[in-house]
Image (cartoon, helix red, strand yellow):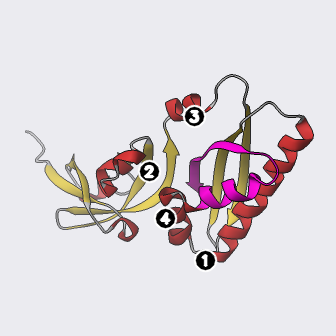
Amino acid sequence: MAIKKQWYEIVAPKMFDEKVVGETVAADPKQLAGRTIEVSLMDIAKDYSKFFVKLKLQVEKVEGSKAYTKFVGHSCMRERVYRMVQRRVRKVECIQTVKTADEKNLIIKTVFVLIRRVNTSTKDDARKKAKELIAEAAKKASLEDLVLMIIKGELQNNIRKTISKIYPVGDIEVRETKIL
């Protein structure tokens, strides 16, 4: 005897206007809880300049034929980072755990390039300043606001402006976030 399966619409969180981002099939709604999906930001926001950003959403609850999700992280495609780093530039990476204003812990991984090869002390100064700016922004914002700042690029622009006073910055990208 075959098991009757049903289709469920996957709904994005409120910060992404609860848009339907896909469908999945399950025999029982309980099987959907905890299921993680990866969706392109291009599909949700209709912003084709952010095609390389992938959002990670986890099914939180199921009501009727809709599966509601929560944001658990994002990542950039590896090819985007490879494209940023070319010859005669210096890649700087920052990995840190921050706490937002609403007491959520978040790992943020940032990568940026300085436009020329520089000595280690300049690279370390730039990394230290970037970490300070990220921690300060996280302390002032809720999780939802911080994620939207990262996705829209506002945080990256603030970091670029400040670090360019130390040494000119080429590209900058928050390559990954994870909620702990």
Specify whether residue 64 is in view. Answer: yes
For residue 75, above or below residue 30:
above
| Mark 4 burial class by Cα count in 10 Å: few <14, some 14-19, many 20+ | some
Q: CA distance from mark 2 to mark 3?
A: 19 Å
Q: Amino acid at mark 4?
A: Leu
Q: Amino acid at mark 3?
A: Val
Q: Of label 1 and label 4, which has the lower sequence position? A: 1
**Residue 4 relative to residue 154: left or right:** left
**What x and y, as percent, mark residue 42?**
34, 48
Residue appearing at x 65%, y 48% in the figure: 109
**What x and y, as percent, mark residue 128?**
83, 53
Residue extending furthest toward the top:
87
Report which residue position mark 3 lands on.
81
Specify whether residue 36 is in view. Answer: no
Q: CA distance from mark 1 to mark 2?
A: 20 Å
| Mark 3 burial class by Cα count in 10 Å: few <14, some 14-19, many 20+ | many
**Where residue 56 is drawn, which disc sits there?**
2
For residue 114, above or below residue 128:
above
For residue 56, above or below residue 60:
above
Report which residue position mark 4 lands on.
148
Residue extending furthest toward the left:
1
**What x and y, as percent, mark residue 136?**
73, 69
> Would you say the residues marked 4 and 3 are in contact, meaning their CB atoms lie under 8 Å apart?
no
Q: Amino acid at mark 2?
A: Lys
| Magenta stretch encompasses residue 159 | yes
